[in-house]
Image (spheres, rainbow, N blue to C red):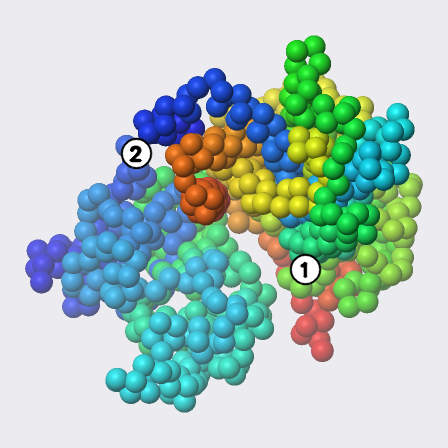
């Protein structure tokens, strides 16, 4: 028992001397290659408490969690779990100490059944000397675990049939089976529908009452504010704010995270209200089971937002407009030209650009250089034929200018692989790729998803510049603040249908939320 | 690097490997292999694989030989026999490549399956055609002009060297300087992103297979003229060498990575390896074992590199 540490902990929390924290970090530091990334991080986690950990990317959240999880070793400082000195060397040590991680990307075997996933590596045997799996006991144990997380699926069901939310519950059940006392959630709601998120939040409440300590990491501050008892804000490897949730507002939280206030987060627009001729006209577009009777238009220099819950058909609509998916009836007109059967190449030729919601899978060649990604869509404009030499002098100049304009942080455009860029810079590369084609209509699907506050701001600035230069912008986002900060009009989508169109002057959070979930409540 | 170490290593046991004679033999042996490896590289870049190259070579060999041969050839003694024969090689290569490409690109079939099937089909067809055309297992007595392609020279330069260099130069400039080149890499790196960025993915993939077929045809011309016989088993044991050389050179099996220089280094290394083992006096089986291990090692490195780049 390191009594000295226990003493200092008591001093740190004079108000609560009797309760020893479940987990306690004191002045944890870490450097990588001589660069200090954690400058003495300290916070406590009590049993039955939720600590919300927030901060921009690069603020030290991941490093802190990696130190807790035994992926990295700290340079100095102290970590105490349940009164015992804790210094994990490998992830297995963290598991033994009762720490479980619920990651953004779930570690589930899609080809195995739920019960096999739950008890992977710890299958009950028929007898001590009979190494054959006892399926009866396996099923029994799996049932108990599934009941504990309130998941109503058969233990024999294949994990591939589960939704992301259900898979996450399986992960949590697995953590419980390992007797985890501390569960760390890292961006748990990114791939969940709002209903699944609600279910997760209810479960987190239950875990709390069972005395489990929870660290909840998320970019969605509304969720953090709702769940957490204590909030810890990290910036540049330091704890810049720490305290009970009730003592801080969202605005102050953002200020603490970025070091300045929320009003400055959305760029000002020079052309607001002065829109030109219509660029995109969508008339009664329908595709059974996907979208129904969708009509709207976007004018030059205008930003139109599509709000709606996940699964409301927003992304599907964007894909239809860009010719990636078919539609059965209706009309899509871009700058007066109708697209009967759109196809990406024709859409690009017609002046359209599309930023997909998944930049890694569909937006970028991760192993390619920044330049290889930037030039891809514009290349055909710089050649005479498919097998003639690329006239790359003009292209080079334009790419360098673009790097300046968008402030893409990469050492050498022609060498640096996109994979090594931060999320915000990667997204700027996708935007830059389309800017080289000077699009008339830019469709952006979740342009700031997964980006931290600072990067979001930069991406939004680029979008605003684009609109100011006269491009018609159609923007899909799950974050209402963002749509309200950026758009001239917001269209609400619900179960494949467009609901109300809300003008900027009438923007009101409640109105948009209501329009988005109206039918869900009404029926 | 590796090549130098290997050559010095072997030289300790068999000094002849450093002789001019060996150098000449290696240079001659590497040329047709290089052409084939370059063709395979195009397909590997778009994350496909072409297993049918050797079958194409055998098929071209017997058909062209049956046209050109002096004993019962369709155009025996005719002055256009050789040009027509060469056209036959190329047409067969292009057609099989086109078929593979269409299956892989438009019908979205795994190229491994498609080219495995065409390999068996075309290979079988070559044997059947030979037995239908002649009683023996191969077709010899090819015209003098054709035989000169393999070992002859113009202006003091070996014809096969000129042919292989031309292929290498064209391939290199295509990959590094043209739109097609950029598109090939784009499709191999991320097909979805390429499609969304306006790359005609189907056309690009099909083109890669057609190029592979054409390269197989050119390699077949050199090989056939060297052995002075049209035979369905012209390149029977060459498939592993072709794919192996590409991988050893650093062309990735996962697509998106590969150059003509890599193809050249791989082909050169494999040829020198072969020669060195021969000089050491190893049996054919030992040679195969060693080659297999080297190729396996290269494939393992490729996988490791892929993992590493994904982890970053």
Tell whether label 2 touches label 1 (CB within 8 Å): no
Residue A407 showing in the rendered view: no
> In the image, A116: left or right of A308?
left
- The quarter holding residue A19 reads bottom left
Picture quarter with the N terminus of chain A: bottom left
Which residue was labeled with disc 2?
A33
Neighbourhood count class around disc 2 (C-alpha, 10 Å): few under 14, some 14–19, many 20 upward: few
Residue B122 x/y as whole percent: 74, 51
Task: Give coordinates of residue B38: x percent, y percent.
Answer: 63, 33
Q: Residue at x 61, y 28 (%)?
A: B31
Report helix, strand or loop for mark 2: loop
Q: Nearer the viewer, mark 1 or mark 2?
A: 2
Nearer to the camera, B156 or B292? B156
The location of residue A481, given as percent across then percent down, is: 60, 50
Indicate whether B45 appears above or below A152: above
Q: Element type at marker 1? A: loop
Using the rendered image, report if marks 1 and 2 lie on a common chain.
Answer: yes
Residue matched to label 1: A308
Please give the name of the residue rendered at 81% of the width and 52% of the height, measured from the top-left corner: B132
Chain bearing tag 1 is A
Rendered-image quadrant of the C terminus of chain A? bottom right
Q: Earlier in the sequence, mark 1 or mark 2?
A: 2
Of all chains, the one bearing label 2 is A
């Amino acid at each position: 028992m390191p009594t000295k540490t226990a003493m200092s902990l008591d001093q740190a929390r004079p108000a609560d001397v009797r309760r020893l924290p479940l987990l306690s970090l004191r002045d944890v530091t870490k450097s990588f290659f001589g660069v200090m990334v954690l400058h003495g991080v300290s916070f406590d986690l009590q049993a039955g408490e939720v600590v919300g950990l927030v901060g921009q990317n690069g603020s030290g959240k991941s490093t802190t969690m990696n130190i807790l999880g035994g992926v990295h070793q700290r340079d100095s400082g102290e970590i105490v779990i349940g009164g015992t000195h804790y210094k994990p060397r490998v992830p297995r040590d963290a598991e033994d100490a009762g720490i479980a991680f619920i990651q953004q990307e779930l570690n589930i075997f899609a080809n195995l059944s739920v019960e096999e996933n739950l008890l992977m590596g710890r299958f009950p045997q028929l007898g001590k000397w009979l190494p054959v799996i006892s399926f009866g006991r396996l099923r029994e144990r799996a049932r108990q675990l599934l009941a504990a997380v309130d998941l109503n699926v058969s233990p024999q069901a294949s994990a591939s049939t589960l939704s992301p939310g259900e898979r996450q519950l399986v992960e949590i059940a697995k953590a419980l089976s390992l007797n985890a006392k501390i569960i760390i959630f890292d961006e748990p709601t990114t791939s969940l529908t709002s209903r699944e998120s609600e279910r997760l939040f209810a479960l987190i409440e239950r875990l709390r009452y069972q005395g489990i300590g929870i660290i909840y990491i998320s970019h969605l501050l509304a969720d953090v504010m709702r769940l957490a008892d204590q909030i810890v804000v990290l910036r540049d490897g330091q704890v810049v704010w720490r305290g009970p949730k009730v003592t801080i507002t969202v605005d102050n939280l953002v200020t603490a995270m970025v070091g300045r206030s929320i009003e400055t987060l959305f760029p000002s627009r020079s052309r607001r209200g002065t829109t030109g001729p219509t660029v995109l006209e969508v008339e009664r577009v329908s595709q059974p089971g996907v979208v129904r009777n969708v009509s709207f238009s976007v004018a030059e220099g205008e930003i139109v937002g599509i709000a709606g819950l996940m699964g409301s058909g927003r992304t599907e609509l964007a894909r239809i407009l860009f010719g990636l998916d078919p539609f059965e009836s209706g009309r899509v007109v871009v700058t007066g030209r109708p697209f009967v059967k759109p196809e990406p190449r024709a859409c690009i030729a017609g002046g359209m650009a599309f930023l997909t919601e998944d930049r890694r899978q569909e937006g970028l060649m991760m192993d390619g250089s920044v330049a290889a990604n930037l030039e891809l869509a514009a290349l055909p404009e710089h050649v005479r034929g498919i097998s003639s030499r690329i006239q790359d002098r003009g292209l080079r100049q334009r790419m360098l200018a673009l790097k300046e304009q968008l402030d893409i942080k990469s050492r050498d455009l022609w060498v640096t692989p996109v994979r090594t860029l931060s999320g915000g810079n990667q997204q700027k590369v996708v935007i830059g790729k389309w800017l080289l084609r000077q699009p008339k209509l830019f469709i952006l699907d979740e342009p700031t998803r997964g980006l931290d506050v600072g990067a979001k701001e930069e991406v939004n600035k680029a979008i605003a510049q684009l609109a100011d230069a006269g491009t018609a912008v159609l923007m899909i986002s799950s974050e209402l603040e963002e749509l309200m900060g950026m758009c001239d009009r917001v269209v609400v989508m619900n179960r494949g249908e467009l609901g109300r169109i809300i003008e900027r002057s009438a923007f009101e959070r409640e109105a948009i939320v209501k329009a988005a979930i109206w039918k869900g409540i009404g029926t | 690097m590796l090549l130098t170490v290997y050559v010095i290593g072997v030289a300790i046991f068999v000094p002849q490997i450093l002789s001019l004679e060996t150098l000449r033999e290696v240079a001659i042996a590497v040329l047709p292999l290089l052409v084939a490896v370059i063709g395979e590289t195009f397909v590997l870049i778009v994350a496909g694989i072409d297993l049918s190259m050797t079958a194409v070579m055998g098929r071209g060999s017997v058909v062209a030989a049956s046209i050109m041969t002096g004993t019962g050839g369709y155009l025996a003694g005719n002055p256009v026999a050789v040009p027509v024969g060469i056209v036959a090689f190329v047409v067969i290569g292009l057609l099989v490549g086109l078929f593979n490409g269409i299956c892989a690109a438009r019908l979205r079939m795994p190229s491994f399956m498609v080219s495995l099937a065409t390999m068996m089909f075309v290979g079988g067809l070559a044997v059947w055609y030979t037995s239908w055309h002649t009683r023996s297992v191969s077709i010899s007595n090819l015209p003098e002009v054709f035989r000169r392609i393999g070992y002859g020279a113009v202006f003091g330069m070996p014809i096969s060297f000129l042919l292989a260099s031309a292929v290498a130069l064209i391939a290199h400039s295509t990959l590094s300087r043209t739109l097609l080149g950029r598109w090939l890499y784009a499709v191999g790196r991320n097909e979805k992103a390429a499609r969304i960025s306006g790359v005609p993915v189907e056309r690009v993939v099909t083109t890669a297979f057609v190029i592979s077929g054409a390269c197989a045809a050119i390699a077949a011309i050199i090989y056939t003229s060297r052995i002075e016989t049209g035979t369905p088993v012209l390149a029977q044991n060459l498939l592993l060498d072709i794919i192996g050389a590409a991988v050893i050179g650093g062309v990735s099996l996962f697509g998106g990575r590969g150059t003509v220089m890599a193809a050249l280094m791989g082909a050169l290394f494999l040829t020198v390896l072969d020669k060195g083992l021969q000089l050491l006096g190893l049996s054919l089986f030992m040679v195969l074992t060693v080659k297999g291990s080297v190729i396996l090692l290269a494939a393992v490195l490729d996988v490791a590199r892929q993992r590493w780049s994904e982890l970053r």
